[in-house]
Image (spheres, rainbow, N blue to C red):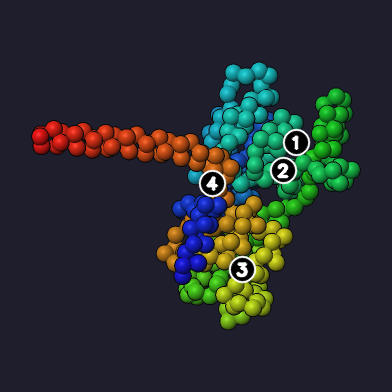
Amino acid sequence: MGIQKAVKNLGRGFIGLKQENERTISQSILIVDNGYGWIGYLESAIESIRGYFPAAEITVLTFTERMTVLQKDFSGLSFLLPAQGLRPARYQVALEMFKIRKNTYDFVVLLSLDASPLIVSLFLFRSKVALYNQWNQWWSLRLRDISELFKHTYTNKRTMSGLKGLVKRLGLFFVLLQRRDEELFRHSVLIVDNGSISFQHIDCIVQKVKDFLPCARISMLGMEERKMLMDKGPDIEFIQAGRCLFKRYRIARHMLSMRKNRYNYIILLSLDVSPIVASVPFMRDRVILFNRWQQWWSFKPVSMKQYLMIIPRVIIDIAIFIYLLFSVSWIFLKRSFNALRFGF
C-alpha cells in the first residue's frame, strides 16, 4: 500500500484531474457563414450536424438578417455577429474568428473555401476543420505534410480564373482536403475496464456515449471474463488484454501496446494507478474518468507554465516563513527579556 500511495502522490505532480460534467463528450461546433450563400445550404449543414451529434452545442457565425431566419427554424443555437464597421466587408467574418480564436471548439465548419476564414481556422484554431460544400459533401481540411504536397485530393466544380483563382489554387496546394462524409464524425472511443466495476456501470457509460456520439466506434479493453459485453450490440468491439506476468498489470501493458492507435476519447472507469500511467501516451486525445458515482473527470498533463509557477510560490512561501520566524523569535526574546527584568 505504501508504494501504491507513493506512486499516486508522484503522479499528481505530472497529471492534473479536473471535474467536468457529462457534456465533456458532447461536441462544440462553430459554423462559419460567409453571408452570401443560399441560406438553405446553411440550414442543411445544421441539420446534418445535429444528425451526427444530437446534443452538440452549435454556434453560428453569421449576419443579423440570417440569424433572424435561423432563430425561427432552429432552437438551441448560439450566434456570433461580425463587426460591421470593418472595410472591406469580406474580411468581417475572418476578424470575428480572430477574436474568438482562443475559444475551444471540436469542429470549425466552413461553408466555402474563402481564403481569409480558411487561413484563420487552420492557423489559429486547434479544432478540426471541416468543409460542407454545396453538393452536401463533408471534407476534412488540414495543412499538408511535406510528403503530401503533391497529393491532389480536391477539384472545385467551378472554374477558377484570374488572380483570385490563382491565389486559391496556390492556397489549396498547401491544404489537404479529403472527402470523409460520415467518417469525419465517427469518433473512436476506448473504454478501459480493469474488472472492478459492475456491469450496470458499464451499461451506463456505453449508453451515454451512444447518446452523445451515436456514430462513434466503441471499443472495450478488458479481461476475458468481460467478453459477454459483446452481446451489448454490434457497434462494440471487445479487446481482450494480453497475458502478463502480473495479472493486475495486464490492462496497462496492453494499453501501452496500443499507444500508436488514435482514439478521440479514452474513458477510464476507476482510479487504478497502472491504467492512468499507461494512458499518458494518449494524452494528445481526451482521457476521461467516469467513476462509480457517475462523475466525469478529465486528465490533463501538467504544463510547463504550471511547473514554472512553482518557483515564485516557493520563494514567497520561504519569505513568509522567514518573516514569521523572525516575528515569533522577536516576540519570544522580548517576553524573555521582560521576564528577566521583572525577576530582578
Q: Which residue is mark 4?
A: 57
Seen from the viewer's position, the closer of residues 261 and 201 is 261
Q: Which residue is mark 3?
A: 252
Residue 86: x and y in percent read 62, 19
- Mark pair 4, 3: CA separation: 34 Å
Asked whether the beta carbons under mark 1 and mark 2 sit within 8 Å of each other, the answer is yes
- Mark pair 4, 1: CA separation: 24 Å
Q: Which residue is mark 1?
A: 113
Residue 149: x and y in percent read 86, 42
Q: Closer to the observer: label 4 or label 3? A: 3
Amino acid under label 3?
Ala
Q: Quadrant of the C terminus?
A: top left
State the residue at coordinates (85%, 34%).
169
Q: Is residue 63 visible?
A: no
Amino acid under label 2?
Leu
Q: Which residue is mark 2?
A: 131
